[in-house]
Image (cartoon, grey):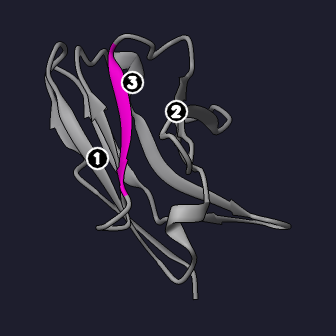
Amino acid sequence: QVQLVESGGGLVQPGGSLRLSCAASGFAFNSNPMMWYRQAPGKERELVATVSNFRGSTNYADSVKGRFTISRDNAKKTTYLQMNSLKPEDTAVYYCNVRLYPFDYWGQGTQVTVSS
C-alpha cells in the first residue's frame, strides 16, 4: 500500500534551518509529482511546494519563495524540503502528499516549531 513517512521536524530558532524528508513506498514514485503541505493551528492546510516527476521543476507558495527548496531523489524514493531563514509563522505540521487519481495520500506529518 502507499506509504509516506516524514521526518526531520523539530524546534528551531528564528533564522535557523531544517531539512524535512519524506520516504515513499507502494507506488511508482518516479512517475508522480510530490508535494509538501503545512497546517498551522486554527488554519487550513496550505500547499507549500511541488516538485514534478519529469524534470524536477518546482513551484512554491509566495510565503516561502527564496527560503524553501523542494527536491527529490528518485533512486531513494525520497522527497526533501530544505527550509532556511525560518520565521515564527512557518510553525506548523508539515505533510508530504502524492495524488494518485482519484485519491490523495498523506504522511503522518512532522511538527516544525520556530521560536526563540
Camera-side residue of 114 and 48:
48
- Residue ID for mark 1: 20
Q: How far is the residue under mark 3 from the one under mark 1?
A: 13 Å
Which residue is found at the position 50% from the left and 12% from the top?
63
- Judge from the rendering whether residue 39 lies leftward or rightward of residue 77; answer left or right: right
Q: Alpha carbon of mark 2 to alpha carbon of mark 3: how far? A: 23 Å
Image: 11 above or below 4: above
Looking at the image, is mark 2 or mark 3 earlier in the sequence? 2
Residue 111 point in image, percent of width and height: 34, 47
Nearer the viewer's eye, disc 1 or disc 2? 2
In the picture, measured across the screen, residue 112 lies left or right of residue 24, that is left
Callout 3: helix, strand or loop? helix
Sequence order check, earlier mark of 1 and 2: 1
| Dot 3 alpha-carbon crowd within 10 angstroms: few under 14, some 14 to 19, many 20 or more | many
Residue tagged 3:
90
Magenta stretch in the rendered image: 67-73
Answer left or right for 19 relative to 64.
left
Task: Name the residue: 28% across, 46% down.
Answer: 20
Name the amino acid type tagged 1.
Leu
Q: Give the secondary structure at mark 2.
A: loop
Principal secondary structure, stretch drawn in magenta? strand
Specify the amino acid type for callout 2. Ser
Quarter-of-image position of residue 13: top left
Rendered location of residue 58, percent (x, y): 51, 30
Observer-nearest residue: 73 or 68?
73
